[in-house]
Structures are given as structure tokens and as C-alpha cells.
Amino acid sequence: DSGVTQTPKHLITATGQRVTLRCSPRSGDLSVYWYQQSLDQGLQFLIQYYNGEERAKGNILERFSAQQFPDLHSELNLSSLELGDSALYFCASSVRSMGTIAQIGELFFGEGSRLTVL
Amino acid sequence: ELKVEQNPLFLSMQEGKNYTIYCNYSTTSDRLYWYRQDPGKSLESLFVLLSNGAVKQEGRLMASLDTKARLSTLHITAAVHDLSATYFCAGGDSGYALNFGKGTSLLVTP
């Protein structure tokens, strides 16, 4: 168990709908990362938050948005869903900056939220 | 942006055999990670390699890093069925997201 909690584990919805995925990072971790994993695209970085602020953006669509709250949990909002959005969405967190050099960059992943768009 | 390429992408090997997975990356990176993923499961960190010539070993897996060649390898010794999984290498700078390769799906057969 990595300590990163994601809900829901599975989600089935229809095209055009909107869903919210939730992530609670490891206790004390300030950074949260969202990744999308699909068969054709592999593991794609979407967005990173650090202590409530957006830190880096990857291949995140405009229909997707995220935020990190004061208690450090994060939500990924996916709207106007399309069939191609079906994927496994992972949240990861990284150790607080007071850790060792090796630990600072290591990402700990949650179990993922499997989204199926029909 | 750091790009990571792994090969092979699929690997079927017999129990007891040895093999190496290769990971090339495009630009300098603070560190290189190897992760394991079982089907439908999360990613588990196996190794972190921080400097040129770094070598880490855990059981039948050994990872190494050559920063000059921008190459990391994951060597499997005397494979067993439990090693069947997808292995990812990933790189990136400290404090930022890791960029992952496409993964190597390993199947170890009797």
C-alpha cells in the first residue's frame, strides 16, 4: 500500500458527461501528480500541483481540469467525455522536500480510477 | 522535454533464462527510475538511479545507469514466473513529474 488513496476505483459513464476523480496523497506529501494510462498512449503526465498551486502541465486536454485543496487532496475533473477518454487515471504524490535527495523525486502511485465512457 | 524509449516492448522468456531491458532517454535527467506494474494494478517503484555508473540490485533484478550514453538497463537473472509484469523506466528532474517509457511487458513461461 503506497498510502495514496484514489476514489472511485471504477466509473462507467456516457459520452458528454462529467466526472470527478479524487486523490488523497501520502501523509505529508505536498505534490500531487495526475497521469492517464491507456493502451495506445501509455502513461501520460497530465498535471502537477504543489501545495495547492499548479506547478506543471503535461498533455492535459482543455476539457480536463484539476485542483488541489488546502488539505492537499486533489480532484481531477473530466468533462464532455468522449469514448477516447476511457483509461486508467493515476494519482501520485511525492515525498516532502525534507526527504533525502533520492526520495524527493520518487513518485508513489495510487491504485488508479478506471474510467469507462460508453 | 525528456523522452524515454524502452526496448523491447514485449518480451517472452523461459524460466531460468537471463535477459536485459534497455531504456534510452533523450536529455539529461536528475534521476532514472524503474517501476513495476502488474495487470490492472498500480505502479511500484523498484529502483532509483542517481549517478553515472550507479548499480542497484534486488533479488533477480539489477538496474544500472550510464549517463554518458543516456542509457539504463534492467537485467533479469534466472527469470521466474513471479517476475511477469510490465516494467517502466522513467526520468525527470527533482520536484517535477516523471516521464515514462511505454513499458516492457514481460511474460515468463515454464
Image (cartoon, coloured by chain):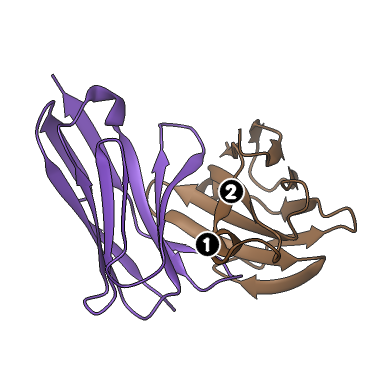
Chain colours: A brown, B purple
Q: Quadrant of residue B72?
A: bottom left
- Which of the image's four quarters has the N terminus of chain A? top right
User: Which badge, 2 or 1, comes first in the chain's sequence?
Assistant: 1
| Identity of the residue drawn at 82% across and 65% down | A52
Q: Secondary structure at mark 1?
A: helix
| Identity of the residue drawn at 56% across and 70% down | A58
Q: Mark 2 — residue?
A: A108
On screen, residue B28 versus residue A20, left or right, reads: left
| Identity of the residue drawn at 69% across and 66% down | A97
| Identity of the residue drawn at 80% across and 65% down | A51
On screen, residue B99 versus residue B103, left or right, reads: right
Foreground pick, A115 / B74: B74
Q: Is residue A111 above or below residue B45?
A: above
- In the rendered image, residue A70, in percent from the top left (x then y), is placed at 90, 58
Q: Mark 1 — residue?
A: A102
**Label 1: few (<14), some (14–19) or many (≥20) C-alpha neighbours in 10 Å:** some
Q: Secondary structure at mark 2?
A: strand
Cα–Cα gap, marks 2 and 1: 13 Å
- Which of the image's four quarters has the C terminus of chain A? top right
Foreground pick, B52 / A86: B52
Chain under disc 2:
A
Q: Is residue A93 above or below residue B65?
A: above
**Label 2: few (<14), some (14–19) or many (≥20) C-alpha neighbours in 10 Å:** many
Chain under disc 1:
A
Q: Is residue A48 above or below residue B70?
A: above
Name the kind of residue labelled 1 in the image: Ala
On screen, residue B8 versus residue A88, left or right, reads: left
Name the kind of residue labelled 2 in the image: Phe
Q: Quadrant of residue A5?
A: top right
- In the rendered image, residue B108, in percent from the top left (x then y), is placed at 19, 28
Task: Name the mark on residue B75.
Answer: none
